[in-house]
Image (cartoon, coloured by chain):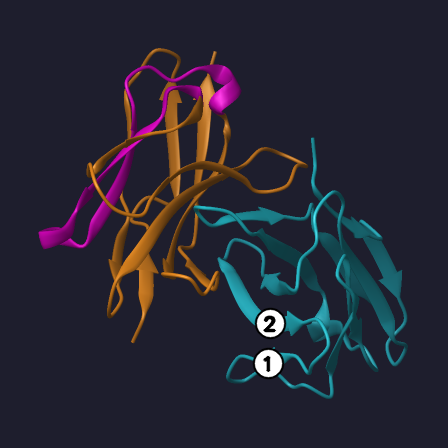
Chain colours: A orange, B cyan
């Protein structure tokens, strides 16, 4: 069955700490991978996406993610978080060209000032 | 700025009534839109694909007679929750892909439905 797992449900960090959020997927065929962020009271926004090519993807606001095909993983990283990164982060997987996504359960990140 | 809007943002209704939620793409045309449902502390679950000019396609386990979808134009899809019950209370989110060299999908801000 197709699925996306996010291992960390809640993460609390101090400002300037490094962040890594795990995402593993089970999906047949060629996949497109996404990380979305949802700030309190706002809609989902795309942080970054991977379709093909360089497995290390850089997104907005200093975030990056690495696609490791052998591990079916697409972990999100940021070297130094800020208070404004407090939000919920969703990993999503889609089959190329369908626009239909399967989302992970999300990770609530709280950054302490 | 937002490119997909939803209306209303929040609705409270009595059990047995029907509620209509609108999803609009603001500056592009979308022949396809998607409706998701998000339970508290859970993931977004795809409910259905809204297709302009044809019937919506529903994911397994989603009652099509319960959740009526109409893609009235290239910029508007509506989700009607018919005869709503408390278990239909949830956060409903729509999305619309924007055609281009790489797929880009925009999400609406969501509609919180509370059925009393």
Name the residue at 31% across, 48% down: A51
The magenta stretch is: A61-85
Quarter of the image where one finds residue A107: top left
Quadrant of the frame with the N terminus of chain B = top right
Tell me if residue A82 is in the magenta stretch.
yes
Name the residue at 49% across, 16% down: A83
Residue B13 to residue A103: above or below: below
Distance, label 1 to label 2, CA atoms, is 5 Å
- Mark 2 lies on residue: B49
Q: Return the disc, 1 or 2, that comes first in the chain's sequence.
A: 2
State the SS at label 1: strand
Q: Residues within 10 Å of mark 1 (few under 14, many from 20)?
A: some
Q: The disc numbered 2 marks a residue on which chain?
A: B
- Work out whether residue A86 can be spotted: yes
Residue A45 to residue B64: above or below: above
Q: The disc numbered 1 marks a residue on which chain?
A: B
Quarter of the image where one finds residue B61: bottom right
Residue B49: image location, x then y, percent: 60, 72
Residue B12 relative to residue A84: left or right: right
Name the residue at 32% across, 50% down: A6
Tell me if residue A66 is in the magenta stretch.
yes
Quadrant of the frame with the C terminus of chain B = bottom right
**Closer to us: B97 or B13:** B97
Q: Are marks 1 and 2 in contact (CB under 8 Å)?
A: yes
Query: For residue B57, which numbered disc appears in the image?
Result: 1
Q: Are marks 1 and 2 on the same chain?
A: yes
State the SS at label 2: strand
């Amino acid at each position: 069955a197709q699925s996306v797992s996010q291992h960390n449900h809640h993460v609390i960090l101090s400002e300037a700490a490094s962040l890594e959020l795990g995402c593993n997927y089970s999906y047949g065929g060629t996949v497109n991978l996404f990380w979305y962020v949802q700030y309190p009271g706002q809609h989902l926004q795309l942080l970054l996406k991977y379709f093909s090519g360089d497995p290390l993807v850089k997104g907005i606001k200093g975030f990056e993610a690495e696609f490791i095909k052998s591990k079916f993983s697409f972990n999100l990283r940021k070297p130094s978080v800020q208070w404004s990164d407090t939000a919920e982060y969703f990993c999503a997987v889609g089959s190329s060209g369908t626009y239909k996504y399967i989302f992970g359960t999300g990770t609530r990140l709280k950054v302490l000032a | 700025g937002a490119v997909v809007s939803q209306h209303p943002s929040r609705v409270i209704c009595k059990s047995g009534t029907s509620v209509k939620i609108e999803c609009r793409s603001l500056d592009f045309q979308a022949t396809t839109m998607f409706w998701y449902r998000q339970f508290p502390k859970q993931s977004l679950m795809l409910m259905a694909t809204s297709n302009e000019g044809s019937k919506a396609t529903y994911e397994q386990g989603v009652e099509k007679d319960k959740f009526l979808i109409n893609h009235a134009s290239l910029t508007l899809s509506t989700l009607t929750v018919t005869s709503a019950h408390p278990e239909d209370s949830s956060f409903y989110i729509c999305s619309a892909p924007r055609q281009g060299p790489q797929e880009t999908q925009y999400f609406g801000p969501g509609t919180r439905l509370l059925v009393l």
